[in-house]
Image: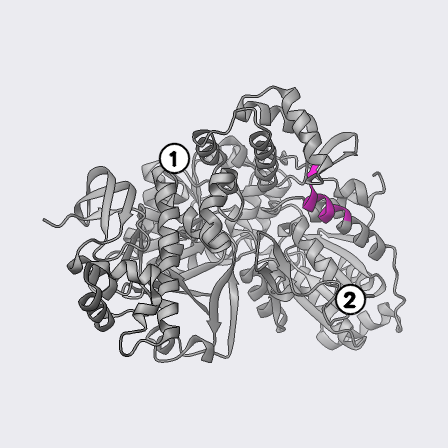
Amino acid sequence: EPVTVVGCLPFAAPGEGLTVEGVWERHPSHGEQFKASSAMRSLPVGEKHIYEYLASGAVRGIGPATAAVLVNRFGSHTLEILSDSPEKLAEIKGISARRARDISETFRRQTGMRLLMEFLAANGLKPEYAMRLYKLYGDGALELVKSNPYVIASDRIGGQFDEADALALSLGFEEDSPPRIAAALIFEMVHNLNNGHSFLPREKLVAATAQLIGVEAETAEECLDVLADEGEIVQEVVAGVNAVYLRRLYEAETCTAAALRAMAQDTVPAKKNVDERIAELERETGMRYAAQQKEAIRLACERRLLAVTGGPGTGKTTIIQAILRLYDDMQLDCLLAAPTGRAAKRMTELTGREAYTIHRLLGAAWAAEGDELTFRKNESDPLRCGAVILDECSMVDITLIQALLKALPKGCRLVLVGDADQLPSVGPGSFFLDVLRSHAVAAVRLTEIFRQSGESRIIRNAHSINRGETPELRENKGDFFFLQRPSGERLAATVAELCSERLPRGMGIPSGDIQVLTPTRKGESGTFALNERLQQVLNPPAPGKKEKIFGETVFREGDRVMQIRNNYDIVWCKGGDTAAIIAGEMAPGSAPETGTGIFNGDLGTILRIDTENELIWIDFDEKLAWYGFEQLGELDHAFAVTVHKAQGSEYRAVVLAAGRAPARLLSRDLLYTAVTRARELLVVVGETAIVQAMIENGRKTRRYSGLRARLAGEV
């Protein structure tokens, strides 16, 4: 009797054997099914199952007709022939020697993947780790994992240290073995890098490592010094702190500081009186610039490096437009850039000129071998421009700004624009804030709110929040609404009702123009729970609407999704006949623009789920990308996203779920960032006490960074 099994079963094909462990459960839509916590695949046995397996397309180059010929010829030995004797395949009419080699190589590669997956599954590890490992290390992946299980906890594989450590101990690693301690030290540093730190104080790193793996602090210190001698880490006293850096972070910080200091000290006398040109620009445009704006425009013409910070409605876009006009007069070819695709798209819309993501501008790609991100544009092949204006600088981490600075040609100007009061970058460092606090770089802080912007309660309340003042919280007031709801079911139900009924019907705002934001991923008002609820009301199951179950997640055509980790290898095309490309009537390469790379935080919509070819087609802001089913672990639903993930984006309408969350997330800068994501309408749903607690929590989480001190000449 057929049984429905759900779980992560990548590459499972008809005819294969499956041994699964898990529990029975009843799904509200799909009925009784077996939820697999682990699965072991086995190659098919017997001619019938071998034919089903090969005819399904499980091995590239073999379809139903070829499968029938192979099984008729080789019977139950077919798979052995595929693996070990490609020359016998070439004896069959219609199969050339080259095709035989290709088929055999594909089958052996899949077998290697299978062995790796089975080894990991037997040790309780996720199958998606196998895919990433095999992609990076090929046939040597299994032996690598056995010799160094801690590779599983690396950034590109995405495993947890405790998973890798449990495997290592089961393979016979001693608890106090140097490789184990070294892996724990590196893990703690990478983990804290992901929390925004560029370095860790030595005593904190040693204590955390000792606690993590249960060794003496002295033992961890000895291993740390060995890592320093080997060059993997760098130790230096920074502003009185015994700092420990990963080498690449140390190089990023020191190189960035040196480049910025050199640029900050370099003035570039203007060929024409800048004040006169600003006055001419006012006459040409009919616009009157405020004193702070004039100062920023003037400095952009007289300095190689300028930082401009200001909240919403303070005229940052106006300044960018004016600087572009003056750079045109100066015959400076100016490039526009931003850290995210949505921020770059918004910059393009506001300036009328193409803006690029930093990754695209620099030609980011993973190295052919290894775990290193490379950039095509660098000091050996710099950008061709006279100036760069970089927007949303609060989102830029220390490694990305280093890459950009290395790619600037000699004499190039750089204008940094952003809002330093927003949440800091997800990546390491606090680059933009450090630049402003160093007082070593020419900087302008915009404080005046202009009349038209001042009429927006979103903007007025954002500035009130930023000053630590409580905004007027009324249920019905202009473009800023507050709906008092207790945390839990009532709050979540109200959010769903707003998105599906009240705002579309009452205010004419389509559901697709509404973005739900929340401080947290967990809890009844977190992204997990809200996305499940919102999917049911905004994109419910329907006849003809295809679905794909991946683990516990149901992906459905029409779903809004988000990429949750940088993937520089995903292929996309732009500008072609989308329907024809998806239908296979046109090659993606025929589109006017093609490229690779979908990045953490990119939002898209699932257009089609192709179960036959195991592909999902997704529209990411007019870029059409395709994912194999095995890559679905890189996607989350995005009907609701965290405020951190929304950085750099702007939405027509925002619904903020202000429910209970961990205290560290209930901060003023998080609330301020959430409010400033809304362009036309903001609805805050939650408890007054929680909103008040966020406003009162003006403490900024300390990030360990040495950039400010280096810029100020203190190191």
Q: Which residue is mark 2?
A: 409
Q: Residues within 10 Å of mark 1 (few under 14, many from 20)?
A: many
Name which residue type carries label 2: Pro
Contact (Cβ within 8 Å) of mark 1 with mark 2:
no
Choose top left, top right, bottom left or bottom right for residue 414.
Answer: bottom right
Mark 1 or 2, closer to the camera: 2
Q: Say above or below: 111 vs 327.
A: above
Q: Kindly identify which numbered label has been placed on residue 255.
A: none
**Residue 680 shows in the view:** yes
Name which residue type carries label 1: Ser
SS class of the residue under badge 2? loop
Task: Say which of 51 and 407 sits in front.
Answer: 51
Question: Percent x, y for residue 273?
Answer: 89, 71
Question: Percent x, y for residue 41?
Answer: 28, 48
SS class of the residue under badge 1? loop
Q: Which residue is mark 1?
A: 487
Identify the magenta region.
244-254
- Residue 184 is inside the magenta segment: no
Q: Is residue 410 left or right of residue 694?
A: right
Task: Say which of 367 and 444 sits in front.
Answer: 367
User: CA gap, disc 1 to disc 2?
Assistant: 53 Å
Question: Percent x, y for residue 202?
Answer: 69, 29
